[in-house]
Image (cartoon, coloured by chain):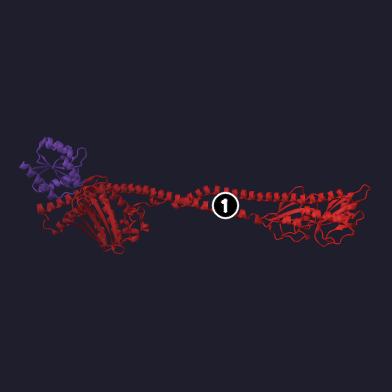
Chain colours: A purple, B red
Amino acid sequence: MRVLLVDDEIELVSTLAERLSFRGIDVQWASTSAEALAKVENQCFDVAVLDLRMPKIGGLALKDKLIKKYPEMKFIFCTGYGSEEDFKAIARQVGEEYYLVKPLDIETLVEKINTVLEQNLKE
Amino acid sequence: MNQNRQALNEKSAFPTSQKQRVNYRRIWKLVVFLTAGVSLLPLIFITVIDYQVTQHAIESEFLSRTTRTVSNTRRVISFFLEERKSALNFIVHDNDLKTLETPMRLANILENLQNSFGGGFTDLGIVDSSGYQTNYVGPYPLKGKKYSNQDWYKHVVKQGTYISDVFLGYRRAPHFVIAVKKTMQDGSFFILRAAISITPFEALLSNLELGGLGDAFMINHEGTLQTISRNYGNVLGTLPLSVPKLSDTSQVYEGENIMGHKLVIGYRFIDNSPFILMIVKNKTELMKSWFQTRLKLIAFLIGSITVILTVILWTSGYMMKKIKIADERRLMTLHQIEYSNKMASIGRLASNVAHEINNPLAIINEKAGLIKDLFVFKGEYAKDEKLMGLVDSILSSVKRAGTITKRLLTFTRKFESSLEKINPGKLLDEVLGFFQREAEYRDISLNLNVSENTPEIESDRGRLQQLFVNIINNAFAAIDDGGRIDISVGLKNKHQIFILFADDGCGIEKKNLHRIFEPFFSTKTGSGGTGLGLSITYNLIQEIGGEIGVDSELGKGTTFKVTLPLKMK
């Protein structure tokens, strides 16, 4: 299981990656969408945790690019912008993805990742 | 505490300058003054002119009527004198002296005269050129009397005919004399003299219909009364008025008697006689009919002024009321726009602040989380309870701050009108979240009771939030510390839900109860209230198709009853 974390807040994404790795998750992180796209060139990821608001290419646009390369990749979105109900509206358009509001609870994130992966395995 | 209440009261959100009001009373006064001036001044002006013209016309009419009476009476009197003078002339020319000196003949002539001319002729006498009365018929013993020293004798000798003033003479009774002289061929002359009683004169004058306490009499050129006067004395008395100026025509002028009463005086000098005909009327009596007309005129003026003023007052009052209502509506709309803009600005500001805080919060959360992970996973300091406690404290504070920013985002998210499915209980819970801290400080118990059968409704979240905040704000302002607010939500019927907001605050006076939703009605104007809070609430409810009612008892509390449709149209 390999997870890709993408967030423009380097302090946040690096710390989060370290915490996930403490929990036995193979995690890589990127602070821009370009960096993330470069990472997927060499490695395969099962799950991507994407920030919705990032400079240039946002989370939803990045998802479109990633899914073209890895159609089976699963996504979890997070943001400090907007609320759960805002996202529901977007979620209805783009699919049944998961969504988390910052500040994240690490256990909830791990749980979400596991749930997504289980779904992946079932499929 | 008062400051807190004021801060809670959304009414204070409007700046004072917005509340500056037009002085409608001053405008109303100005309108009434100008309209009344423009309409009443011409009316008063025309009425005054009409008053003067009418008064002048009536006075002229009285003067000309008096002139006509004087002229007509003069004609009768002149005819009376002329007739008698002609008769005497005829007698002296028809009879010679000898015949006339025959007592029987003279008595016969007197009788004929009395029969032909009615009253007046008292006696007849023949006076010779030496002034002795040689023959006399009449009731007095005047034969042989000498008249050569008397004025009338001198005048008749000189002029040929003469009409005397009224005098008493030998008989001591008022009369006047008409005498005619006949000169004979030998140059000698004799005079036929007739004494005429003033009774026919007086009868003639007293029969005149004069009106206005009118008085008709005759005077001589010296102002001595020649006939009896109703107001100025008896025959041969002196008239207490000045003798009028000599004139050939009938004249009328205005004068005063010694009592100061105004008089209309008409007079005419009778030709070839010493008499002046006088007709004197009391002006006040004459003008009595004018006074009645004047009363009608004044009554018309007062009536017209009253009607005009009533119409002006009513119409200007009505128009001013309409303008005031229109102005208030316009102001209300402006306030509402301002209120919405302000809420939107606050929303945007809060939203930005929440987002900006969220990112550093997330970093703090992760860093503290990492510290904890290091303690737990690496075993270092894992048993240091104090350090673990400190990290947990940081994490719980981050969680608390996160809850606040999340709530802010939820609340300020939407200000444009849009329909969505809303759980009323949940929304009320969110709104109450904002009041929790205040409620804790003031020891106010907030209770939300949502019935199980409460369905979701389709409505405008932004408006619902605003109106809930407004109503709860009001309740907070009304209750004392330690009070309670109970909110109940439930299904009213298959189309509507109900929400009751009950507080145990000061309540609303019965007389104010029906006015609380009116714009600008406030009992808290002294503390910064604009009187718009509940009015805005009312409009918000109208906009989302709901209804609002209120029950209140002074000193016990108030319940706002809100009904909302399940589906907003």
Dot 1 amino acid type: Leu
Quadrant position of residue B102: bottom right
Left or right relative to B131: residue B111: left
* Residue B375, image x, y percentages: 12, 53
Left or right relative to B376: residue B182: right
Q: Nearer the viewer, residue B416 or B556?
A: B556
Tag 1 residue: B297
Q: How many marks?
A: 1
Q: Image point 84% across, 56% down: which residue?
A: B107
SS under mark 1: helix
Q: Residue furthest left?
A: A122
Q: Nearer the viewer, residue B193 or A17?
A: B193
Please identify the quadrant where the N terminus of chain A is shown.
top left
* Residue B219, image x, y percentages: 77, 56
Quadrant position of residue B233: bottom right
Few, some or many residues within 10 Å of mark 1 (<14, 14–19, 20+): some
Q: Image point 92% across, 55% down: which residue?
A: B130
* Residue B525, image x, y percentages: 37, 57
Please identify the quadrant where the C terminus of chain A is shown.
top left
Left or right relative to B45: residue B324: left
Residue B513 appearing in the image: yes
Residue B177 appearing in the image: no
* Residue B425, image x, y percentages: 20, 54
Chain for disc number 1:
B
